[in-house]
Image: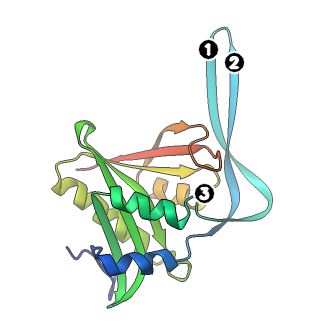
């Protein structure tokens, strides 16, 4: 499968030699905002709200999964696509799992090399994931993000994903996961 709207970028299924290259991509990011969760308990009712809060200074954030966890996740993936700038030069990847009984394809990892961000690589990978999901008869595309991954939250919202839930203490570092979903047409 080759899907791309960018010249010289191809999206294809990953091959075994690609895995080592994927581990070398810089997945860290910088953010000036976080989604802060507030809870209020009143008369047997729990209200949960999220709001974007500006940080006092930019924060550098490491990717929430280490290499060992990534490799384990990749083995469990039903779909793993890479973005290749030129033959052999990987600039991003997307890992996909399915919940067929619920019609969901989940993006478990989306990484774009830091020098290639905001150039359409992430968008091309998400479009390829949507096409992959449609080809497999699925009708929703879902992703999970850390509350501090404000750049990715904005990225997904710009592409039509909507907030659909959260899981407190989801990641190994006890961060909250936010879930966003988009229907596949």
Give the farthest residue toward the right: 56
Give the farthest residue toward the bottom: 87
Q: On screen, 124 above or below 42?
A: below
Are the residues flagged by discs 3 and 2 in contact, CB closer than 8 Å?
no
Residue picked out by circle 3: 149
Q: Foreground residue, 46 or 23?
A: 23
Q: CA distance from mark 2 to mark 1?
A: 6 Å
Image point (42%, 59%), residue name? 72
Give the farthest residue toward the top: 43
Q: Which mark is residue 127?
A: none
Q: On screen, 28 above or below 147?
A: below
Image point (66%, 42%), residue name? 51
- Local packing at callout 1 (Cα closer than 10 Å; few below 14, some 14-19, many 20+) is few
Residue picked out by circle 1: 45
- Local packing at callout 3 (Cα closer than 10 Å; few below 14, some 14-19, many 20+) is many
Q: On screen, 184 above or below 24?
A: above
């Amino acid at each position: 499968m080759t899907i791309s709207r960018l010249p010289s970028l191809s999206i294809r299924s990953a091959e075994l030699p690609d895995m080592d290259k994927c581990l070398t991509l810089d997945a860290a990011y910088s953010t000036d905002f976080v989604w802060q969760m507030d809870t209020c308990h009143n008369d047997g009712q729990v209200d949960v709200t999220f709001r974007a809060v500006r940080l006092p200074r930019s924060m550098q954030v490491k990717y929430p999964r280490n290499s060992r966890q990534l490799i384990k996740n990749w083995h469990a993936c039903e779909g793993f696509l890479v973005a290749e700038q030129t033959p052999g030069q990987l600039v991003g990847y997307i890992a996909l799992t399915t919940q067929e009984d619920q019609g969901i394809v989940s993006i478990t990892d989306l990484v774009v090399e830091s020098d290639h961000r905001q150039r359409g690589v992430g968008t091309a990978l998400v479009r390829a994931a949507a096409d992959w999901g449609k080809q497999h008869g699925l009708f929703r595309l879902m992703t999970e993000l850390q509350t501090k991954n404000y750049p990715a939250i904005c990225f997904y919202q710009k592409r039509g994903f909507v907030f659909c839930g959260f899981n407190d203490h989801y990641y190994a570092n006890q961060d909250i996961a936010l879930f966003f979903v988009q229907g596949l047409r």
